[in-house]
Image: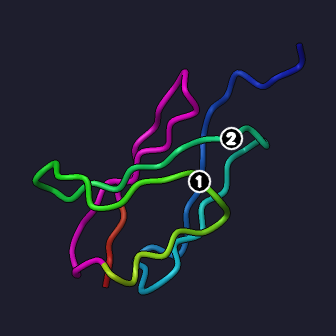
């Protein structure tokens, strides 16, 4: 098919206070996992356009986005 081989996402703002906006390059469905720097999962679910991170403590976190075949992880800062 004409599905893109590029699996990437952008997230903003970074650092974030409440809502972390996540944008995939295409319209595929994906899941997300947020882990702290100890590797503990602190939030996960189906990816939509924004993730509420207001309940997280201040610090550095890893956001992993997985479409079932590929996964990509990026770092963000919660203020």
Closer to the camera in the image, 37 or 51: 51
**Residue 42 position (above or below residue 55):** above
Instruction: Indicate the position of residue 69 as horizontal and vertical percent values.
Output: 55, 21
The residue positioned farthest toward the top in the image shown? 1
Outermost residue, front direction? 45
Find disc 2 in the rendering and name its residue.
29
Answer whether residue 36 is magenta in the image: no
Q: Viewed as shown, does residue 37 lie left or right of 9?
A: left
Q: Quadrant of residue 59?
A: bottom left
* Location of residue 6 in the rendering, given as x and y in whole percent from the top left corner: 67, 28
2 and 1 marks in contact (CB < 8 Å): yes
Q: Which mark is residue 47?
A: 1
Task: Determine the CA span between mark 2 and mark 1.
Answer: 7 Å
Residue nearest the observer in this picture, 37 or 46 = 46
Other residues around mark 2 within 10 Å, as few (<14) / some (14–19) / many (≥20): few
Above or below, 63 relative to 57? above
Which span of residues is magenta-colored?
Answer: 56-75
- The quarter of the displayed image where residue 2 is located: top right
Tell me residue 32's x, y (percent): 47, 49
The residue under the point 16% across, 48% down is 39
């Amino acid at each position: 098919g004409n599905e893109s081989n590029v699996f990437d996402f952008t997230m903003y703002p970074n650092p974030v206070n409440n809502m972390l906006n996540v944008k995939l390059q295409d319209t595929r469905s994906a899941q997300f996992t947020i882990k702290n720097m100890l590797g503990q999962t602190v939030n996960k679910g189906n990816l939509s356009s924004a993730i509420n991170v207001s309940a997280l403590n201040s610090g550095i976190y890893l956001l992993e986005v997985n479409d079932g075949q590929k996964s990509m992880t990026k770092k963000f800062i919660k203020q």
